[in-house]
């Protein structure tokens, strides 16, 4: 192909973005939509309450953990400390969750998210409480976000043997849709951030690692692996 006929990087990026948007629009993901809507609604309540009290959202949220700990821990997967915290989790949940959800039966996806929410909250609590006697708060939808990202890591090799051909760029591109490729990139990024978190200090201290991120990612990876094993067993 001549240079005149070759697509420019901008054109290629535009075509890829269009393919990704079309892929996501075609996916039925009502549970993910409900979770995202719930996160946004709860944050709206947080923001209005903080505005009325003339205090930062994080301060107001921390006070709820002191005054109403049962309610705070129940809502912890939906609470956020500020707008950037909310935006990051909502983007990952909305994009990756929409791609991942159709790979589950509805009830299994709900169970997956509930398990990720509970275990990630526990991981977030224990990773702090182990190194302090002070009250600990752990909240945010990042456990859910890391869980769906962890599951997305398995999408490029779902249903195939893990050999050189399966792991080749052409093999992955041939088997996956645009949405699945983007979701897998989120999975790689999530894994990198968790590994960097574990590998950097201060070690064995209150601020060492985010246990919710670590546990959420592990729940996603483990679920993807069990799905893979079940699919292989079903084909025999």
Image: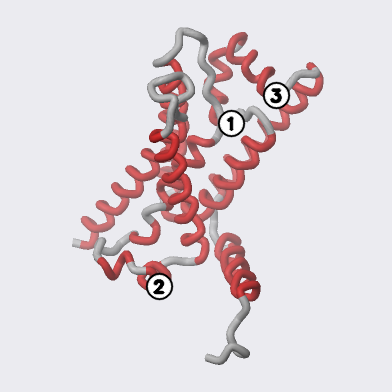
- Residue, disc 2: 174
Of labels 1 and 3, earlier in sequence is 3
Q: Label 2 crowding class (10 Å Cα cut-off): few <14, some 14-19, many 20+?
A: few
What distance separates the C-alpha of mark 1 from that of mark 3? 13 Å
The residue sitting at 43% across, 36% down in the picture is 216
Please determine whether, in this image, residue 72 is positioned above or below residue 102: above
In the foreground, 51 or 206: 206
In the foreground, 108 or 159: 159
Q: In this rendering, would 97 be left or right of 196?
A: right
The residue sitting at 28% across, 56% down in the picture is 231
- Residue, disc 1: 78
Give the colouring mode of the picture. Answer: secondary structure
Q: Secondary structure at mark 2?
A: helix
Please determine whether, in this image, residue 27 is positioned above or below residue 122: below
The residue sitting at 74% across, 28% down in the picture is 47
Q: Could you say which quadrant of the image residue 197 lies in?
A: top left
Q: Label 1 crowding class (10 Å Cα cut-off): few <14, some 14-19, many 20+?
A: many
Please determine whether, in this image, residue 128 is positioned above or below residue 180: above
| Disc marking residue 48 | none
Q: Secondary structure at mark 1?
A: helix
Image coordinates of residue 64 in percent, x first then y, are 63, 15
In the foreground, 64 or 168: 168
Q: In this rendering, would 149 be left or right of 89?
A: left
Q: Nearer the viewer, mark 1 or mark 3?
A: 3
Q: Residue furthest left?
A: 236
What distance separates the C-alpha of mark 1 from that of mark 2? 37 Å
Q: Nearer the viewer, mark 1 or mark 2?
A: 2
The residue sitting at 37% across, 54% down in the picture is 154
Image coordinates of residue 65 in percent, x first then y, are 58, 14
Of labels 1 and 2, earlier in sequence is 1
Of labels 3 and 2, earlier in sequence is 3
| Disc marking residue 57 | 3
């Amino acid at each position: 192909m001549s240079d005149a006929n070759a697509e420019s990087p901008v054109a290629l990026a535009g075509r890829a973005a269009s393919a990704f948007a079309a892929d996501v629009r075609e996916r039925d993901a009502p549970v993910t939509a409900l979770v995202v809507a719930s996160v946004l609604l709860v944050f709206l309540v947080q923001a209005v309450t903080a505005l009325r009290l003339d205090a930062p959202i994080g301060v107001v949220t921390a006070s709820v953990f002191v005054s109403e700990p049962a309610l705070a821990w129940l809502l912890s997967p939906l609470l956020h400390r500020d707008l950037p915290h909310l935006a990051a989790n909502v983007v990952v949940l909305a994009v990756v969750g929409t791609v991942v959800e159709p790979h589950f039966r509805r009830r299994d996806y709900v169970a997956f998210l509930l398990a990720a929410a509970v275990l990630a909250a526990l991981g977030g609590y224990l990773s702090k409480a182990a190194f302090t006697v002070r009250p600990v708060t752990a909240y945010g939808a990042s456990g859910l976000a890391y869980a769906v990202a962890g599951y997305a890591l398995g999408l490029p090799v779902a249903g195939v043997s893990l050999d050189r051909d399966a792991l080749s760029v052409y093999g992955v591109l041939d088997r996956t849709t645009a949405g699945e490729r983007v979701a897998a990139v989120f999975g790689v990024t999530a894994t990198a951030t968790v590994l960097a978190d574990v590998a950097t200090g201060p070690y064995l201290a209150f601020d060492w690692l985010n246990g919710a991120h670590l546990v959420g990612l592990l729940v996603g990876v483990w679920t993807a692996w069990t799905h893979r094993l079940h699919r292989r067993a079903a084909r025999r």
